[in-house]
Image (cartoon, helix red, strand yellow):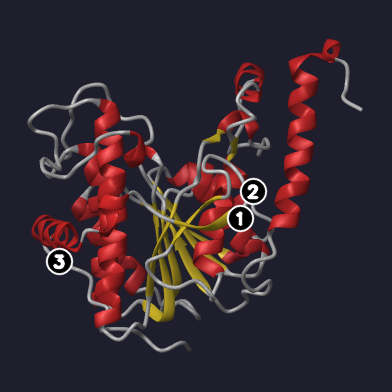
């Protein structure tokens, strides 16, 4: 029997969150439950999707490196995880090519036991709410594209050339439904001919998906030692996400507003399940896209990316363009053996 409406939106929000927690608990059946000895890198993990992906991996015993721009926020995120001794933090701005190169060097030079490589990279960091006016990074690159797509290409380039990817590693790129909701194209990747915040976001996500699929083509050509996949979180909102002190503390107003969207949205802890499945499920083939079962919400299932993502000519051109900007390109022939 449904509860009386007189109990208000706050009560409805609590009920929705309780139901969602049960659903998420029942959801974590994919991939190995024991990830002891495995190591993962998640960018943009001080909050949101990245945080919940990292939290789930740590709960399964994995060693996890989390990155973000703020050292303080990363430390707070690590402290909020059940086994923070398994978490290493690394603060840098992935939209800055020099900072990304330096971060990769620190990762490659890590002398810690078990730090010989990664079983998975979750390339999650990004600008979700782009500026209304076009901005450029210190490298002279449009900021949204630099952060959401190019920075991850650069990071992967430095790590793969340095043999930091273990045999069978999963490379998970954060996609979106945005490219399917607009006429996103990549003829003007940096939007010099006309900028809007929506187009900047949609095009950056299309670029990300194109790079992911092209990356899988190249990984297969190099022997198939790693898999490159796309995961998109549907419509994940903060107001439907559990409170994590010091990490995620939405206001009552935010919770009330987002509860009205619950029919078509989900919490960030639920959206993160797509990334979690993509990076841990050994049955997934490279080139696949993991999506919510109901497009904007639901359990992680195999789906598809926007059709332009699979264009091999576009993939080759964008790969070369990103390599020219980053000064490096991923090398999937250099794979370190698991230790």
Is residue 90 placed above or below 117 in the rendered structure? above
Q: List x then y, in percent, for residue 238.
A: 57, 32
Look at the numbered discs 2 and 1 and tell me whether their residues touch, using CB distance below 8 Å.
yes
Cα distance between the residues tagged 3 and 1: 31 Å
Instruction: Tell me how far mark 2 sits from mark 3, CA to CA.
Output: 36 Å
Element type at marker 1? helix
Q: Is residue 309 above or below residue 238?
A: below
Q: Nearer the viewer, residue 53 or 47?
A: 53
> Relative to 163, does residue 94 appear above or below in the rendering?
above
Viewer-closest of 141 and 111: 141
Can the viewer see residue 47 in this picture? no
Task: Of the two numbered discs 2 and 3 on the same chain, state the one appearing first in sequence.
Answer: 2
Place residue 10 in its image quadrant.
Answer: top right
Q: Position of residue 47 (x, y in %)?
A: 52, 42
Quadrant showing the N terminus: top right
**In this image, 29 relative to 151: left or right?**
right
Which residue is identified by label 2? Answer: 80
Q: Residue at x 31, y 30 (%)?
A: 130
Residue 218: image quadrant is bottom left
Q: Earlier in the sequence, mark 2 or mark 1?
A: 1
Decide: few, some or many residues near mark 2? Use Cα within 10 Å; few <14, some 14-19, many ≥20.
some
Residue located beneath label 1 in the image: 55
Assign a secondary structure to mark 2.
loop
Q: Position of residue 133 (x, y in %)?
A: 20, 22
What number is the disc on residue 328?
A: 3
Residue 231: image tag = none
């Amino acid at each position: 029997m449904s509860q009386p409406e007189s109990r208000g939106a706050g009560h409805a929000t609590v009920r929705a969150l309780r139901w969602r927690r049960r659903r998420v608990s029942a959801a974590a059946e994919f991939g190995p439950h024991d990830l002891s000895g495995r190591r993962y890198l998640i960018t943009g993990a001080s909050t949101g999707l990245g945080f919940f992906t990292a939290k789930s991996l740590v709960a399964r015993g994995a060693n996890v490196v989390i990155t973000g721009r703020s050292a303080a926020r990363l430390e707070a995120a690590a402290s909020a995880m059940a086994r923070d001794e398994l978490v290493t933090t690394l603060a840098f701005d992935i939209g800055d090519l020099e900072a990304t190169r330096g971060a990769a060097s620190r990762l490659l030079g890590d002398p810690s036991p078990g730090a010989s490589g990664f079983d998975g990279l979750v390339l999650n960091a990004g600008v979700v709410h782009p500026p209304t006016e076009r901005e450029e990074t210190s490298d002279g690159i449009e900021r949204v594209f630099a952060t959401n797509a190019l920075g991850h290409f650069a990071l992967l380039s430095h790590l793969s050339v340095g043999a930091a990817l273990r045999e069978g590693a999963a490379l998970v790129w954060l996609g979106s439904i945005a490219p399917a909701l607009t006429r996103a194209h990549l003829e003007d990747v940096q939007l010099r001919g006309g900028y809007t915040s929506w187009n900047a976001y949609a095009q950056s996500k299309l670029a990300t998906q194109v790079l992911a699929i092209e990356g899988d083509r190249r990984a297969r050509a190099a022997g198939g030692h790693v898999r490159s996949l796309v995961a998109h979180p549907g419509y994940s909102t903060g107001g439907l996400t559990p409170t994590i002190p010091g990490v995620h503390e939405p206001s009552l107003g935010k919770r009330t507003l987002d509860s009205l969207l619950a029919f078509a949205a989900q919490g960030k802890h639920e959206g993160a399940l797509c990334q979690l499945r993509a990076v841990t499920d050994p049955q997934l083939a490279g080139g696949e896209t993991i999506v919510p079962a109901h497009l904007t919400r639901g359990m992680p299932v195999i789906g598809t990316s926007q059709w332009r993502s699979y264009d091999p000519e576009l993939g080759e051109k964008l790969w070369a363009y990103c390599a020219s900007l980053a000064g490096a390109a991923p090398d999937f022939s250099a794979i370190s053996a698991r230790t």
